[in-house]
Image (cartoon, rainbow, N blue to C red):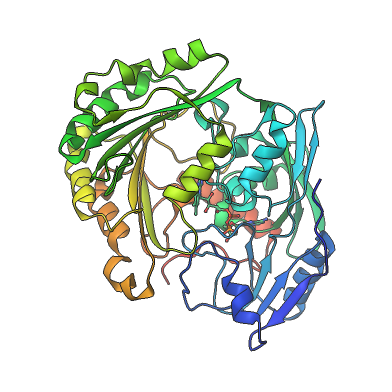
């Protein structure tokens, strides 16, 4: 078990290290110009309690960050107190009970690595350094989530510090409305989660991946085929298409067809991914890899290096869609034709939701997920690229049911992210637990 060390850090605007400490909280290299008045980096739960009392006494709004992977940099607001939980990253595993207690600052890859020693598994995020805090609160599409459910479905309880500094536990039995809200409220949650209590799963015996690469001239054929076959693809395959200006192996603009699979045996893994090898388009693929054994940690590390390098400037937007493929194709083609340079990309994910979800705040999904990620290195290019993702998704918005909070961009483009009834209930629960509005809610356009 890792334990935080050292004292809490507390800085005020104007202090020498203030700017550096505030900007270091963010995965993004972009400085949005917004600054809190006070920055507190907690080292233990009592620091969280003290910070909330300080905020109450000073009438400061509170924003929170754990892993700092909010694309929108939701935690960076003007004024108020920023509470950094990155050092609350302890992992405590009970292999017999198949449960774990983890801090919100714990990275996805660290939990995955720790669980591997016990042959256990949790659907952590696909990039190594995504913090469990924000990931679990917004729902969490993790490794093998099509089979195991959203990661928040495996959260059985949470320790939360409320706006008045009191500490409570939330679960199906205790504070069930807070538990309901914590599974899907994402960046609009109104408490500080200091520990997540997780239900663990058996680690799949085989983790592997197969990949095909197509030149961009095959884009329409590949998407049409993927839409047709998507509903029949086994739930243990994360079937996804990446539109990229620089495909792996060829370096040309095109579509990468990727199929990670988690299975009980090689026979099962081969059978589940056979639709790719036997697909009608295989003859047009520039490359088809064999089914390669790859741990989730290797796949996460590779995704981090190739698609999500740190300290880049980003524009991101997304949509859930049930639209017919013929209606989507013009928008997909335009995304491909206008992508900013690599590693910018767009992701189409064959989701096909399970009908059985628990009653929780998370309530927006559709058969396919589509997200556009523009990335560039230099601040000078902000003006050129920063609207790209919003423009492309806005053009397709009439085909969308709503958005996922994982890749939210509400400050640029407001869109529904839960069912209306759930949104109303969430606001009622907020009113009960945070009556003075101490916590910042969703960062929407003013
Ligand atoms: C490279 C990359 C890869 C990603 N991959 C995936 C993926 O595979 N699947 C997926 O579902 N999502 C993915 N995401 C989205 C990611 O899950 C969300 O951005 C998530 O919010 C990140 O969590 P964090 O703790 O790192 O971020 P933070 O920026 O620290 O948190 C985001 C927001 O969540 C709230 N919050 C965070 N911690 C707490 C807490 N302890 N208590 C109360 N509120 C809190 C705050 O409002 C905060 O502003 C990815 C994002 C990136 C940048």
- Report which quarter residue 36 is drawn in: bottom right
The residue drawn where x is 16% and y is 43% is 330
| Quarter of the rendering occupied by the N terminus | top right
The residue drawn where x is 42% and y is 60% is 410
- Report which quarter residue 415 is drawn in: bottom left
Horizontal and vertical percent position of residue 436: 67, 69
Residue 95 vs residue 303, the one in the foreground: 303
Horizontal and vertical percent position of residue 359: 59, 35
Above or below — where is 90 with respect to 312?
Answer: above
| Quarter of the rendering occupied by the C terminus | bottom left
Residue 155 vs residue 421, the one in the foreground: 155
In the orientation shown, which residue stands out farthest toward the front? 249
The residue drawn where x is 56% and y is 44% is 361
Above or below — where is 335 with respect to 176?
Answer: below
- Total number of numbered labels? 0
The residue drawn where x is 64% and y is 49% is 107
In the orientation shown, which residue stands out farthest toward the bottom? 14
| Residue 361 left/right relative to 254 | right
Is residue 414 visible in the rendered image? The answer is no
Residue 415 vs residue 146, the one in the foreground: 146
Residue 445 vs residue 380, the one in the foreground: 380
Is residue 39 visible in the rendered image? The answer is yes
Horizontal and vertical percent position of residue 170: 75, 45
Above or below — where is 165 with respect to 115?
Answer: below
Horizontal and vertical percent position of residue 251: 27, 45
């Amino acid at each position: 078990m890792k334990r935080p060390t050292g004292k809490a850090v507390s800085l005020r605007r104007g202090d020498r290290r203030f700017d550096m400490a505030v900007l270091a909280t963010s995965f993004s290299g972009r400085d949005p110009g917004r600054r809190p008045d006070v920055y507190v980096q907690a080292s233990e739960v009592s620091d969280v309690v003290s910070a909330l009392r300080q905020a109450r006494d000073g009438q400061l709004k509170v924003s929170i960050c754990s892993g700092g992977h909010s694309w929108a940099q939701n935690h960076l607001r003007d004024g108020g107190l920023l509470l950094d939980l990155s050092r609350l990253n302890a992992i405590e595993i009970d292999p017999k009970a198949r449960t774990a207690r983890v801090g919100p600052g714990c990275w996805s890859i660290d939990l995955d690595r720790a669980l591997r020693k016990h042959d256990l598994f949790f659907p952590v995020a696909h990039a190594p350094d995504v913090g469990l805090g924000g990931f679990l609160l917004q729902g969490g599409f993790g490794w093998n989530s099509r089979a195991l459910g959203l990661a928040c479905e495996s959260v059985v309880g949470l320790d939360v510090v409320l706006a008045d500094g009191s500490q409570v536990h939330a679960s199906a039995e205790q504070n069930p409305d807070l538990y309901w809200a914590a599974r899907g409220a994402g960046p609009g949650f109104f408490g500080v989660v200091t520990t997540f209590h997780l239900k663990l799963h058996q680690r799949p015996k085989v983790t592997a991946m197969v990949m095909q690469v197509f030149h961009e001239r095959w884009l329409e054929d590949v998407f049409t085929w993927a839409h047709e076959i998507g509903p029949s693809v086994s739930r243990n395959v994360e079937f996804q298409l990446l539109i990229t200006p620089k495909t792996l192996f060829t370096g040309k603009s095109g579509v990468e067809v990727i199929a990670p699979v988690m299975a009980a045996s090689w026979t099962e893994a081969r059978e589940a991914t056979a639709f790719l090898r036997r697909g009608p388009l295989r003859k047009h693929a520039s490359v088809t890899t064999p089914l390669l054994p790859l741990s989730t940690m290797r796949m996460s590390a590779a995704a981090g290096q190739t698609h999500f390098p740190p300290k880049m400037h980003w524009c991101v937007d997304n949509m859930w869609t049930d639209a017919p493929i013929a209606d989507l194709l013009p928008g997909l083609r335009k995304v491909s034709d206008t992508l900013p340079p690599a590693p910018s990309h767009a992701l189409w994910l064959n989701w096909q939701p399970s009908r059985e979800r628990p009653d929780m705040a998370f309530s927006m999904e559709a058969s396919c997920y589509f997200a556009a990620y523009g990335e560039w290195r230099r601040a000078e290019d902000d003006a050129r690229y920063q609207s790209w993702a919003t423009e492309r998704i806005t053009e397709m918005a009439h085909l969308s049911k709503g958005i996922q909070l994982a890749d939210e961009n509400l400050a640029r483009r407001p869109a529904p992210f839960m069912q209306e009834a759930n949104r109303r209930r969430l606001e009622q629960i907020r009113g009960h637990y945070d009556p003075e509005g101490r916590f910042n809610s969703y960062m929407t356009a003013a």
